[in-house]
Image (spheres, rainbow, N blue to C red):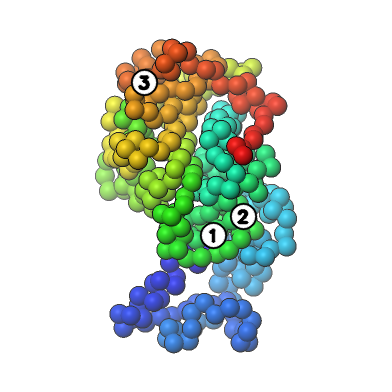
Amino acid sequence: MIAETFEIAKAARKNNGVVIANVARVVEPGYDEVFLPAADVDAVVAYPHTQQAGSISYSRYWPLFTTNSNVPIEEGIARLKFVNYVLGFTPRRGEVDNALARLAATIFAENVRKGSLVNIGTGLPEEVCRLICEAGLFGDVTFFTESGVYGGLPAPGVFFGAAVCPQKIITSAQIFHLCYDRLDVSVLGMLQFDPEGNVNVSKRGEGAINYVGPGGFIDFSMTAKTVIFVSSWMVHGKMRLNGGVLSIAEPGKIKFVDHVDEITFSGKRALESGRNIFYVTNVGAFKLTPRGLELISVVPGVDIRRNILDPTRNKVVLPESGTVPLVDASVVTGRGFRLRLQA
């Protein structure tokens, strides 16, 4: 990734600062395109153990992270999955999480057209991205990361910020400008959401240690035409799937609250701009509408009154028909699960 390196160097130069470039090796002129001209660099430090990505030295760099890579994308994905599994860097997903990811991927497929520009957040959204790729839809949309990696498959876990077989690598500033121009879809996580459609991702609790920088979340959630928030329904609880039916074995702290602790995403502004906003959880999926937060589908085994309305005491709008559709069995179990984008 390039991230903000180019802009930071230019800013330092403009303000009479010092620019020191760290490189893995010294090469002959013409080896590659010039990133920063000599006039913008005060010193160069050559260090052979400089890393291409987490734990990967440039001396033995992985071509799968570069443009014009000759590594099959399936091979690259399998390698990253293995490394993250061994390191224990990414969570070990169970049946309940996998069903949640399939439900979010289904919402994605039903509302996204071919050729869309798509941003994927960290955590559960990465599982949605994996399903999209496994369904053979990788070539139908273009993924990117806020670091400036465009195309390819966003790399998960310890390699976050890079991508497998990217089409091009530009700066973060350039990728954000691209978002303002034509971002179609964002798939993002959330800590809390409320009946107004507001989302909190920046305040985990009290005290300075629990304030988290939102990164590119605000830009990606407020510029995309369609936003799909993905999150578990509760924390510190236990849910089980048995025969395609969800049961809540031990209730936990529900993330659907009266008022989010901090508004990182404004439901009101999203409604005013006429965008499609979805909130996908283990118990079902919601959509932000002018009538309120509407429950558009429910997972088999979930009692709407007992599991959603009573424990939250929050206003939830039901479809005008009065009946909430059940999530398809293939989504819950994974058996016969298929995805297909709109034309």
Residue, x 50% and y 22% (percent of image)? 297
Q: CA distance from mark 3 to mark 1?
A: 39 Å
Mark 1 vs mark 2, CA separation in Å: 8 Å
Around disc 3, counting alpha carbons within 10 Å, would you say few (fewer than 14), some (14 to 19), or many (20 or more)?
A: some
Q: Residues at badges 1 and 2 in contact (C-beta under 8 Å)?
A: yes
Secondary structure of the residue carrying tag 2 is loop
Q: Position of residue 25 (x, y in %)?
A: 59, 80
Residue 316 is labelled as 3
Image height of 33 relative to 51, above or below: below
Q: Which residue is mark 1?
A: 149
Seen at 40% across and 45% down, the residue is: 221
Disc 1 secondary structure class? strand
Q: Position of 281 compared to 64: left or right?
A: left
Question: Looking at the picture, how far across and down is residue 173, in whole percent?
Answer: 42, 63
Left or right, 47 with reference to 287: right
Dot 2 alpha-carbon crowd within 10 angstroms: few under 14, some 14 to 19, many 20 or more: many
Q: Specify the amino acid type for callout 3.
A: Val
**x and y percent of residue 133 in the render?**
64, 44
Residue 101 visible in this rendered orientation of the protein? no
Residue 192, located in which quarter of the rendered image? Answer: top left
- Amino acid identity at mark 1: Val
Is 211 or 164 nearer to us in this picture? 164
Q: Nearer the viewer, residue 6 or 301?
A: 6
Q: Which mark is residue 152?
A: 2
Q: Amino acid at mark 2?
A: Gly
Q: Earlier in the sequence, mark 2 or mark 3?
A: 2
